[in-house]
Image (spheres, rainbow, N blue to C red):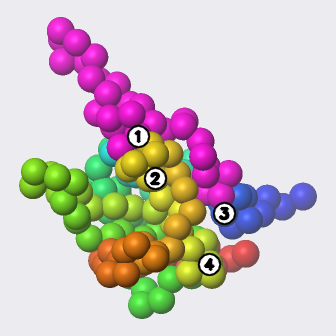
Amino acid sequence: MKPLIFKTYISVIKNGVGSRSFSNFYVSDKRKKIDVTENGRLSCAWFASAVLSLFSFIKAPHLTVKSVEKDLLKSGWYGVKKPKIGSVLIWEAVDFGKGDFHRHVGFYIGGGKAISNSSKLGYPVVHNWKFVDAKNKKGRRVEQILWYKKLDAR
């Protein structure tokens, strides 16, 4: 039997919806433990990179979008103009309040939809790939759409 890597990859992404598995990542500063992902508010990079590293599509999981992006590019991912199912999307930085700007990373799943971690809910959700909805007509600019050649072999 032959493993169906692409189908499994997409299933793992979709099955992540609603999971709190990536909501917390703790570090110690000698005196106390700190949840650097703030109970899921800042978990997009950890969710995306954990999925990607599970399939050896990048070297390791990361906690920042910048480090995920760097690993993706080093691992052979490259920019494309239009998203394909399985593409990694990187969105522009937006202000979380008080000048706290954060970029965002997730996956394109087709039909104008993406899956990424919700900062408000603290777990992955399905949403419009440009974050356009009835309330937010402007959306969020996609800075990069990245593709991996190995995903072509379905």
Mark yes or no: residue 122 visible: yes
> Residue beneath label 4, please?
110
Per the model, the C-alpha gap separating discs 4 and 2 is: 17 Å
Q: Which residues are magenta?
A: 13-41
Disc 2 secondary structure class: strand
**Residue 14 magenta-highlighted:** yes
Q: As shown in the figure, which amino acid type bears the numbered disc 2? A: Asn
SS at mark 3 in the image: helix
Q: Nearer the viewer, residue 4 or 112?
A: 112
Residue, disc 3: 10
Q: CA distance from mark 2 to mark 1?
A: 8 Å
Q: Quadrant of residue 38?
A: top left
Badge number at residue 117: 2
Vertical order, 5 against 154 (above or below): above
Residue 52 in sight from this viewpoint: no
- Outermost front residue: 135
The residue depicted at 48 percent of the width and 39 percent of the height is 22
Which of discs 3 and 2 lies nearer the camera? The answer is: 2
* Badge 2 vs badge 1, beta-carbon distance below 8 Å: yes
Kindly identify which residue carries mark 1: 40
